[in-house]
Image (spheres, coloured by chain):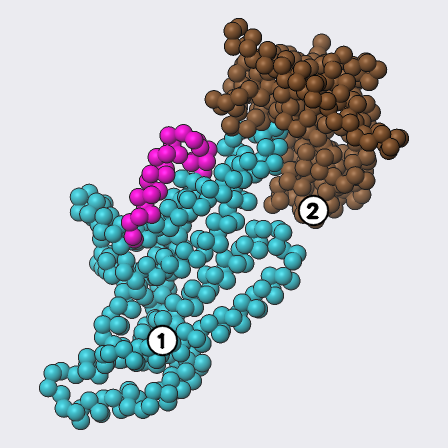
Amino acid sequence: MQILRVLLLRLLTTAITLAGVAVIVFFVIRVVPGNPIAMMLPPGATDEDIARLSALYGLDKPMITQFGIWLSGVVQGDFGTSITTRQPVLALVLGRLPATLELSIMALVMAMILGGAAALAGTRFRGGRTEGAIDVANGMALSVPDFLWGLVLILLFGVLVPIFHISGRVTPSLELPFTTDFYLFESLFRLRFDLWADIVAHMFMPALALAIPLAAIIVQLLKQSLKETMNLDYVTLSRTKGYGETRVILREALRNAALPTLTLVGVQFTFLIGGTVIIERLFSYEGLGNMAIDAVINRDLPLIQGIVILFAVIFTGVNLIVDLLYTVLNPRLRHG
Amino acid sequence: MSFLRVNNLSVRLKKGPPLLRRVSLQVAAGDVHGLVGESGAGKSMIGKAVLGILPPSVEVTGGEIWLDGVDLLSLPLAERRRRIGATAALIPQDPLTALNPSHRIGPQITDRLVDILGWSRADANRRALELLAEVQIPDPDRVMRSYPHELSGGMRQRILIASAFAAEPKLIVADEPTTALDVTVQKQILKLIAGMQARHGTALLFVTHDLGVVSKVCQRLSVLYAGMVVEDTSVADFFAAPRHAYSAALLAATPKYTDPAAGLQPVPDAVIAQVRAEVVAFDRGAAHG
């Protein structure tokens, strides 16, 4: 019951948030300098040409009328037509979304595995050299931004020891039997491990670059709350029951210590998705972020609007999932 | 043969002052041994040392803890934990913090039976239900499936008592088990622990600052001051004629509910000075020895 109520309330606030985002993005990109028509016509085009093309895309109408036309389309699931590619925005954006989702999820999983393992090791061997080494590595991971990690990885594993691909999502010469754009998941589903390995070899470095800063945040938070939890009475009691220290950490402390970390990971995960814009560019990865940069360069207004709305949907969706997960993991919140 | 024998146990803060000064005591199988003293006298510290849960800021500097014929301090950590888990148990002080908030009650009673002693889950569940009935918890089936936050403090302490007796340990350390409870519940819990102890024949190390409780449940007691045992005697002798001046003052300081006009009697300064002098003399002797 509780979960259902939370869900309904959140859907309502989500709708309001998205409406706000729609208004802001629509007007801001029309106020800033730059004009899509000027980008499309060759130099020397006459004023008449410009007026004709503007009329074609409805850009000659008052801004508020343009907004009305766009919004009524959006409500019916029509996000307009991309000015540069002349294809429906929704199809373009949804075609790129799986690539970015797969990259973000892979980065998140890497961050949780790396961060979780380091936090557990640091707690198990607290006060010793292992913890010191983890703290030092952590400080480094935190102080360098994701795109610099991307460059470092390209140098290390793309140039010096070329074991991963540095650009693209999949080797272009490969035959792809996929019916969806979720290459990573579909290759697994179809048991095509050869393709899966190729896709992972492409994703590994961009995903790792995105994962390193998030992993560092996870280590810091999880280790701190694990250490606090390790001094609680129920943990002490379980020691008297005969459990070894590793099992005490995993059985008694981890679940309770993970709760505060989880909320933060949710927030940080949205930053990670934001980070895909630059990382995708760096690795020429054909996702939403790469498309967003092209759209901005070409002043492709409908496409920018579509991408921003989609990012907003993803962000609010991630926050919703985190809240629900929190309710599931913490039994005290279930009967509110 | 005593089931628990502590010999000359010394504990101190790491690179700091001593917390226990060559403490010795013996608890025979099935006996109830009280540990009394003021706050900070080290009574809980003895219980923690016996169960191997001294805080990391503290170190053992000497002595032996013999549990069921084995010196615990000579064992490696994992082995020590297993032995303690199989033969001893703790009834903790605060029932509100001693149960894991994200596990159900059932597994928290049966975990030791299944994981450490290798019982089948079905046997362990049957045993847990029996124990919950024995500690007079209504509807044990439902309680097994509950989370700690759904139960009252008194209920949780009953559950912790049931859990302590689950593996039929030979020794239970009860660390001020009624301090955190309502006065009305304290008496019931005390009676419950005493009854369970008698039925199961478990030796009990009872940490308390309440001499009234000691007179009701214990056979022997150790009086502690500043980590030193000032008197180790039978309860009957203690209440008839305490030998040490500090013990006598402690006894006199216990409020007498039968005579409200008597007021409170603090431990006299002269007695404090005397027992402090003994501690100083002990430390000087230890430094030269």
Q: Residue at x 42, y 65 (%)?
A: A314
Q: Secondary structure at mark 2?
A: loop
* Quadrant of the rendering where the N terminus of chain A is positioned: bottom right
Output the chain of dot 1.
A
Label 1 crowd (10 A; few <14 / some 14-19 / many >=20): some
Could you tell me which residue is drawn at 36 percent across and 52 percent down? A107
Q: Is residue B165 above or below residue A318?
A: above
Q: Is residue B127 left or right of residue B54?
A: right
- Furthest-top residue in view? B289
Q: What is the x, y in percent for residue A26?
A: 35, 79
Give how far apart the Cα atoms at labels 1 and 2 are.
50 Å
Q: Which residue is mark 1?
A: A25
Front position in the image: A335 or B92? B92
The chain in cyan: A
Question: Where are the magenta residues, as a range?
Answer: A120-146
What is the quadrant of the C terminus of chain A in the image? bottom right
* Residue at 22 percent of width and 92 percent of height: A52
In the image, residue A275 lies at what x, y percent? 32, 59
State which mark lies toward you, 1 or 2.
1
Q: Main secondary structure of the magenta part?
A: helix
Chain letter corresponding to the colour brown = B
Compared to residue A185, the image places residue A52 above or below, namely below
Q: Nearer the viewer, residue B188 or B72?
A: B188
Q: Is residue B166 visible?
A: no
Coordinates of residue A2 in the picture (x, y in percent):
63, 61
Front-lying residue, B171 or B83:
B171
Classify residue B73 by image quadrant. top right
Q: Which residue is mark 2?
A: B146
Looking at the image, the residue that sits furthest to the right is B258
- Residue at 72% in and 46% down: B151
Amino acid type at mark 1: Val
Left or right: where does residue B126 sit relative to residue B63? right
